[in-house]
Amino acid sequence: MFTIDTDAAVSRFMDLATIPGKSGEEKAVMTRLIEILSAAGVPEHCFAFDDAHTRTPGGGQIGNLIVRVPGTIAGPTTVLSAHTDTVPVCIGARPVQDGDVIRNQLGEDGRSATGLGADDRAGCAAMVTAAMELLRSNQPYAPFTLLFCIQEEIGLYGARYLNRETLGLVDRAFNFDGGSVEKLVCGAIGGERATITVHGIAAHAGVAPQMGVSAIVIASLAIASLHQNGWLGLVNKPGLFAEPQSCSGTANVGIFNGGDATNVITPLVKMRAEARSHNPAMRARIIQEIQAAFEQAAASVTNDSGVSGCVEFKSTIEYEAFALPDDDASVIAGEAAVRAVIGDSGRTTYREISNGGLDANWLYRHGIGAVTLGCGQQNIHTVDETLSIPAYLDACRIALHLIGNPPVVPS
């Protein structure tokens, strides 16, 4: 079993957490990662950036950083990945150690002003720590690649637009993100988002309301219908598909904007909604029901001339569902690594299918079956975010085990 310099590993996370890097602005983080790995002996030719940021909706400063380290022995190529961006609440983080956790420094009022950014600088730090410890050990190792993704927080865009050719060969893959180190996320739900624009007809609400068509009324009728018919919130439609577990999903109308004055029949409402399911057909059916409800509501509301409103409906698959088989190479290797690290501590490894989207969703679409492993982050995306130091150090050890102990292929 390899050992790690725990003090250096903690300092490395705190260093990375102080660097601002919201989605689309990850260049400074990437620069620091290259500095750290270069100082550890990774040659310049091992570093490459892809052009993912040129295809993301909002552009960005830089693409995914791909660090391909050739092995000293034959063996499977292992990929470790993490995302470098944080949510905006984490800008200005000032991490401090408080017993067995790292949290953001508190202000004079006893409160934290920002989040910590452990999601996912802890994943980045664990990967870098593993690479540094392996290289300084002078032990033989198989090829490995470190993939630092951009823009995960706003749509998994780095993984989505990854240049697969630049990444190169992948035999096993492990995505370090949030959660418990005992948990192996071996699959995840699929999600689709819709933009809904309801067009009504403006009229004076006091003088001639009968001449108008309220976009708010149309939207309200549609949402009420979806709720009453079980197509919002937790959706469960037994018998819709052959397998019971394929008949469930979730749906939500999360953004609702419209109206400028109380004396005007509202002519325009814009909304955003989503649907999720582990069954792509169920997810698509939920979206179909949402669209149908809005179109039916629009047709049912007319003014005194019989003119109705109309609906513009657009949807996009944000990430597709996937589930790795029990005998997948990454699942088996990941479980073995976690067990080797937690040993007889009384903790038990377990596998899970996530109800949230992950970079692993899009890696799977690129032909890469990645297991997602946790780093001990807690209360992510809030000012109360903390990082469990023991769990983070275990994540460093797990990452090191994965790249330092791969099965050797006979020459």
Image (spheres, rainbow, N blue to C red):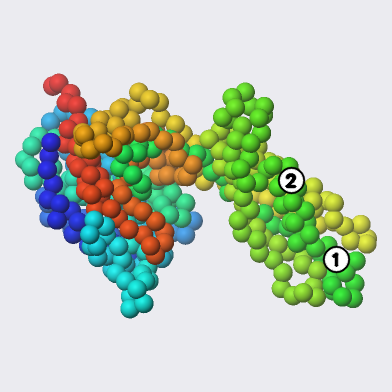
Left or right of 13 on screen, residue 156:
right
Q: Position of residue 94 (x, y in %)?
A: 28, 68
Q: Which residue is at 27% across, 65% downward?
A: 95
In front here: 91 or 107? 107
Q: Residues within 10 Å of mark 1 (few under 14, many from 20)?
A: many
Residue 349 occupies which quadrant of the picture? top left
Residue 340 occupies which quadrant of the picture? top left
Q: Which residue is mark 1?
A: 212
Q: Which residue is at 43% across, 50% downward?
A: 157
- Disc 1 is placed on an element classified as loop
Q: Which residue is at 89% across, 67% downward?
A: 211
- Disc 2 is placed on an element classified as helix
Quadrant holding the C terminus: top left
Left or right of 22 on screen, residue 129:
left
Q: Position of residue 46 (x, y in %)?
A: 20, 46
| Residue 175: image tag | none
Q: Which residue is mark 2?
A: 228
Residue 30 occupies which quadrant of the picture? bottom left
Q: Which residue is at 35% across, 39% downward?
A: 183
Q: Is residue 285 in view from this perspective?
A: yes
